[in-house]
Amino acid sequence: MANKTTAPNPEHTRTGMNPGTLAAAFGDNLNFVIGRPLELSSAEQRYQALAQSVRDRLMQRWVKQVELQNRPEIRDVAYLSAEFLVGPHLGNTLLNLGITESARAAMSELGLDLEALIGLEEEPGLGNGGLGRLAACYLDSLATLGYPATGYGIRYEFGIFDQIIRDGWQSEVTDKWLRHGNVWEIARPEFAQVVKLGGHTEPYTDDNGIYRVRWVPGRVVVGIPYDTPILGYGVDTCALLRLWSAEAAQSFDFEDFNRGDYYGAVEDKVASETISKVLYPNDEQFEGKRLRLEQQYFFVCCSIKDMIRLCQRRGLPLERFHEMHRIQLNDTHPSVAVAELMRQLLDKHELAWDQAWDITRQAMSYTNHTLLPEALEKWPLPLFASVLPRHAEIIFEINRRFLDEVRQRFPGDDGKVARLSIIDESGEKYVRMANLAVVGSHAVNGVAELHSELVTSQLFTDFHQMDPGRFTNVTNGVTPRRFVALSNPGLARLIDDTIGPGWLTDMSRLRELEAHAGDAAFQEAWRRVKQDNKTRLARIIQARTGVTVDPGSLFDIQVKRIHEYKRQHLNVLNIIALYQRLKHDGQVSTMPRTFLFGGKAAPGYYMAKLIIKLINSVAEVVNNDPEIRDLIKVVFLPDYNVKHAQNIYPAAELSEQISTAGKEASGTGNMKFSMNGALTIGTLDGANVEIREEVGAENFFLFGLTAEQVQQLKASGYNPMDYYHGDPELKGVIDLINCGLFSHGDTQLFRPLTDHLLNHDNYLLLADYRAYVDCQQQVDHAFRDPAHWARMSILNVARMGKFSSDRAIREYADRIWQIQPLERQIGVQS
Ligand code: F58
C-alpha cells in the first residue's frame, strides 16, 4: 500500500493531518487492526480502517484533555440523559478536525470515495427524538466551547427500531447497531460500578451510636462504562459520552452450574444484561414498566458513583462534591439521582442529612421537556419500593421535611400540600418524579419561552409560588456544525464566500447576510444551492420509495415523531382538499408541490400508526391519478433518523410546524429547517414563537389558535361537529376518507381516526383547519415569486443566530451551572 501514497513520516501516521499521512494511516489500520489487504477488503472494512484512523486523531486530543482536567479545582458538568441521539460520527469528526478535504484526497488517492465510506456508518440510535438529539447537540456545544463535560447514559444494545413500511403500515425491525462493532467507543472495565436492586433495608446503630440504614439487595448487576470522546469544532477540546452497559455480577453462577442447573446458572446473567438491552421506543407516553425503572436507576447509580470516584481520585472531600460536579437532569428519567446522591452521601459516606441535602440541591438542576400529562413519570409506590427500597425511604424523608416547610408557609392549605407532595396519595400511591426533581434541584427550566411560561403557570404552579427564583427558561438550540456545515456543505460554502468564516461558532454573524438578501446574483446562487440539495433528495426518494418527484416543485416537509398533537393528519387534510380542488375545479391552479413526511410511531400507538397508513394511502391515490398530472406528490420516507435528516433539512423549502398551540414544548426540527433556508408554516407553539420573532412576522407563515385560545375553546365546550358542518370543504375531505376512496373502498379502515376527529378532536384539527388551508394558499402564492421567496429564505438563515446550541449552553453554564470553560478554569488557578 505504501508505494501508492506519498512517503509519510511513519511517526505521524497516528496523528498527521495531511492526505499522505491519512492514506498511510488508513493502510496501517486496514492491515494491522482489520487484518486485510486493500484489494481483498470489503467496503465495511474500509470504513472501519478510516474510522480507526480518525479515531486516533481524536484520542490524541482527548488524552491531553484528560490530563488537564485531572485537578481537584476543575468544575465539570454531568449531563444525565436516558437518551443520546448522536448520529454518525465519521463525517462530523472529520469536519470538526478540519480534515474532510485531506481525507477525501487520501481516499481518492487509493481509488476510494469518501462520501461512500461515510455513508456506510451505522448510526447509534440511542434516542427517540428531540430530547435525545438535544442532548447530542449539547455535547457538541460543550466540547466546542471547551466546558469540561460528561454525558452519562445507557449503552442500549438495541436502539430505536428501524422502521419499514409494508402495505402502507409501519413495522418495526430491531436495530442491531453493534453488529459490526463500534470503532468510536472504548470499554473501561476498570471503572465498572456495582448496582444493587430490590431486597430490603435494615436499620442499625453504628459504633458512635448513630442510627443508620443498610440496604440488603435482592440482586446486583455491574455497569461497564463505554467511552466516546466527542470532539468540538475547530478546537482540541472534547466532551465525553460515557454510556453504561449492564453485565452480570458473576458472568456465570458456578455453584448452580456444578449442581447441574445449567439454565439456573445463566438466568441471572440474562436478567442482568437485559437492563441495557433495549431503548423504550415511546415518546410522550409514560410506561410504568419495572425494567424501565431499573434502567433509569442503573445508569444514574453508575454515574453518581463515577462522579464520587472522580472526587476521590482528585483528592476532593465529598463535602465539596457540588463544587466539582454540576448535574443536569434531562427530563425526569434520571431524577432518581436526587435520592441516589442522598443515599451515597448518607449511608456510604456518613454525611449528616442537612449537609447531604445542601450538596444535592446545589449540584442538581432539572430540565422539563413536556407538559403532556400522559408523559409525566409517576411510579406506583409498591413497584418503586420493591426495586429501590432504600430510595423509597429517603424520598419519604425528603418529602416529610419539604411538606413541613409547606405547612409552615401555608398553614391549613391541605390542597396545596397534596399537590406539592412527591407522593401522590389521592388513590393508589405513586412517586411523582417531576416533584422529586423540582424539590431536589436549585434550578428548573423549560425549553422555550412559551413552554417555560406554561411550566410555571400550569404544571408547577404551587412550586413556582413558593420559590419563583428557582424557575427559568433556556430556549433550546441545535448545532450548526452537524445541521448546516455537515448536512449542507453547499450553503456553508456560499455563506463562507459571502461573509467569511467564523459564523459556525458565532451564529450572530449570519446577520451580515441581510445586506445581500435583495441582491439578485446572491439570490440566484442561494437558489442554486437549494436546487442541488433538492435534486439530491429527489434521487434518494426515488431510490428508497420508487416515487419520482420533481426537483422543481415546492418541497413541503414534515419530519418528526408521529403524534396526534403534532398533527401530521392536519397536513393530510390539506393535501386531500387540494387534491379535490384540482380534480373538480378546472380553474384552480397550484404550484407543483411535493409533500414529504417522515417519522416513527411508537409501536403501541395505534392512532399514530393509522396516520402513517393514511399518508401512504393518500400518496398512492394522488401520485397515480393522471388528472393530477404530477402537480402534487406525496411521499412517506421510511426510517427517519439523524442520517436521513441530514439529507432532508437542506432540501426543504417549507417546514411544517403545526402542533396544537401549547403542546410542543419547543421543537428543534423547526430550527434545523430554518437554518437551512426553509420558511415555516406554523402555529404559535414552542420555539416557533421565538423563531417568528427573530426572522420577522413577514417571513413566517402563521396560522391557528394561540395556546390561550385553545384553552378557552376547550373550556367553553369545543364541538368539532360544528366545524364539520360549517365548512363544506372540510366536510368533503372527511367524507372522502370515510367513503373509502383512499382505502380501496374500505369504509371502515380510517374510521377510528375520523370518528375521533368528529367526536373528540383533542388537538383541535377541525378548529384550525380553515386557517391552515388558507395559509397554505398564501404559501402557494408566495412561492410564485422566486425573488421574494429567496429573500425570505435568506433572512430566515441570517436571523437564526439565537438558535445555536452554543447560545443555549452558555446560558446553562452562566445561569445554572456557574461554570467556566476549562482553559479559563486553569488560567484562574495558575
Ligand atoms: C421533546 N421531548 C419535546 N421526549 O417534545 C420537544 O418539544 C422538545 O423540543 C425536545 O424534547 C427537546 O427539548 C421528547 O423528545 C421524548 O422523546 C421522551 C423520551 C422518553 C420517554 C418520554 C418522551
Image (spheres, helix red, strand yellow):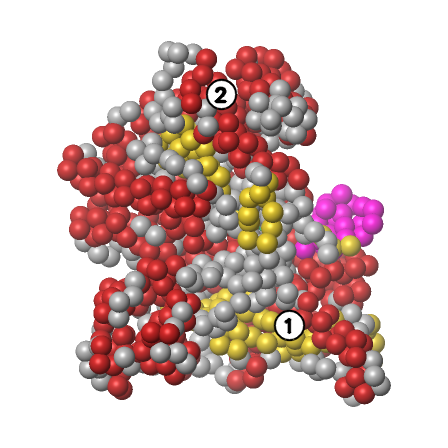
For the question of whether residue 510 can be seen, the reply is yes
Position in image of residue 714 (x %, y %): 64, 26
Q: Secondary structure at mark 1?
A: strand
Position in image of residue 188 (x %, y %): 53, 80
Instruction: Give amino acid for label 1.
Output: Ala
Q: Which residues are magenta?
A: 410-433
Picture mark count: 2
Which is more N-terminal, label 2 or label 1?
Answer: 1
Give the answer, above or below, for where 5 lies relative to 486.
below
Give the answer, above or below, for where 742 lies relative to 563.
above
Residue sitting at x 36%, y 18%: 589
55 to the left or right of 344? left
Categorize mark 1 by other alpha carbons within 10 Å: few (<14), some (14-19), many (20+). Answer: many
Residue sitting at x 71%, y 61%: 291
Q: Quadrant location of the C terminus?
A: bottom left
Q: Kindly report which numbered mark, 1 or 2, lies closer to the viewer in this rendering.
A: 2
Position in image of residue 285 (x %, y %): 65, 47
Q: Secondary structure at mark 2?
A: helix
Q: Which residue is mark 1?
A: 246
Please tell me whether residue 412 belongs to the stretch shown in magenta.
yes
Instruction: Give amino acid for label 2.
Output: Ala
Give the answer, above or below, for where 300 lies relative to 210.
above
For the question of whether residue 217 can be seen, the reply is no
Checking the image for residue 228, the label placed there is none
Q: Please identify the quarter of the rendering in which residue 546 is found.
A: top left
Q: Which residue is mark 2?
A: 577
Q: Please identify the quarter of the rendering in which residue 556 is found.
A: top left
